[in-house]
Image: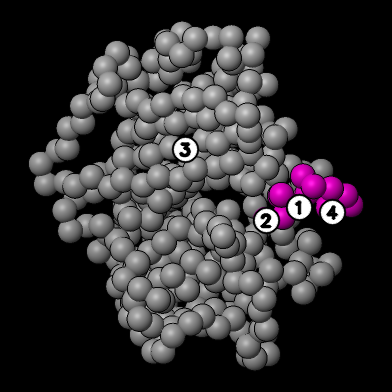
Amino acid sequence: MATSELGEFERIRRFFAPLTGPGGMRLLDDAALVDCPAGRRLVVTTDAIVAGVHFLPGDPPDRVAQKLLRVNVSDLAAMGARPRHYLLTTALPSEFGTDWLAAFARGLEADQRHFGMDLLGGDSVATPGPAVLSLTAIGDVAVGAEIRRGGACPGDRVWVSGTIGDAWLGLAVLRGAYPELAPAHRASLIARYQVPDPRTGLGPRLAGVAHAMIDVSDGLLADLGHVCEVSRVGAVVHADAVPLSPAARAIVEADPSLLPRLCAGGDDYELLFAAPPTASETIRALSASLGLPTTAIGTIEAGAGVRLLGRDGRPVALGDTGYRHF
């Protein structure tokens, strides 16, 4: 059944009202009610994803829903906030039928349970295409505990969680690249592209530890550049220190020239942060307690811009440093 065959209110009742919490009031009103605990402030972020740009038309709808939610939750984690609520807007072509929408709602339901969130409301409209999905995530953080981009200082170490480059390679695999790669490696790279893993356990626990933080969405080097620009500093990254998954490492070992491209690939949704050297043991202990690798990859320095150094200590020539939206 085409989505357009369901009326607006039937779509809301069937697929989205079950996702609400008390503040969403079963979507029976035009707006939601949100409480903010004393001593905390709300953190609000919005991202949209477009078919053919941020996800492929054939991607499973539950994974599309999870990616939509998770790229927003990652922004909350990057400010040290815990996720609480979200609003959703869907603009769908008629060929996205009831089965697609039902699977999409199931993906949201699973993830909002995982992250402790609920739906407050939103909007749904029809479009001739492509599909556009927009989500606004709301979190909260203790007053003064938020971590912003603008606090990096010369002498700070640059750290990144997890691994870099998997999502960029996953998209390449979906488009037919690396057919010789082991099936398990291919599956892991595709999963990293389709379903990011926002670091909600790490972000809030870096309050008072990290001087500045951002999530890696546009690319490691580009996002570090955003931190440097706001903090009015420069940075150096050692290419050999950038953490790679076994799948990515297998590809880079066959073609070492790919490593700088992975540093600019984007869609990793890892946390990238600057912290003083005195915090290193705290960060390592935190990493161990969470079971999440966290790697020192460079330093903040006086000046401007980001330099990537190769194994020989020389700057690596770069084209684009990350994804550009326009």
| Amino acid identity at mark 4 | Tyr
Tally of numbered discs: 4
Nearest to the eye among marks 3 and 4: give it. 3
Q: Which residues are magenta?
A: 168-181
Circle 1 residue: 172
Sequence-wise first label, 3 or 4: 3
The Cα atoms of the two marked residues, 3 and 1, are separated by: 25 Å
Sequence-wise first label, 4 or 1: 1
The Cα atoms of the two marked residues, 1 and 2, are separated by: 6 Å
| Amino acid identity at mark 2 | Trp
Residue 7 can be seen, yes or no: yes
The Cα atoms of the two marked residues, 4 and 1, are separated by: 8 Å
**Crowdedness of circle 2 by 10 Å Cα count: few (<14), some, many (20+)?**
many
Specify the quadrant that holds the C terminus: bottom right
Q: Secondary structure at mark 1?
A: helix
Look at the image and say whether residue 176 sits in the magenta stretch.
yes
Circle 3 residue: 134
**Crowdedness of circle 4 by 10 Å Cα count: few (<14), some, many (20+)?**
some
Circle 2 residue: 168
**Crowdedness of circle 3 by 10 Å Cα count: few (<14), some, many (20+)?**
many
Q: Secondary structure at mark 3?
A: strand
Nearest to the eye among marks 3 and 1: give it. 3
The Cα atoms of the two marked residues, 4 and 2, are separated by: 12 Å
Sequence-wise first label, 3 or 2: 3
Mark 3 and mark 2 in contact? Answer it, CB < 8 Å. Answer: no
Circle 4 residue: 178
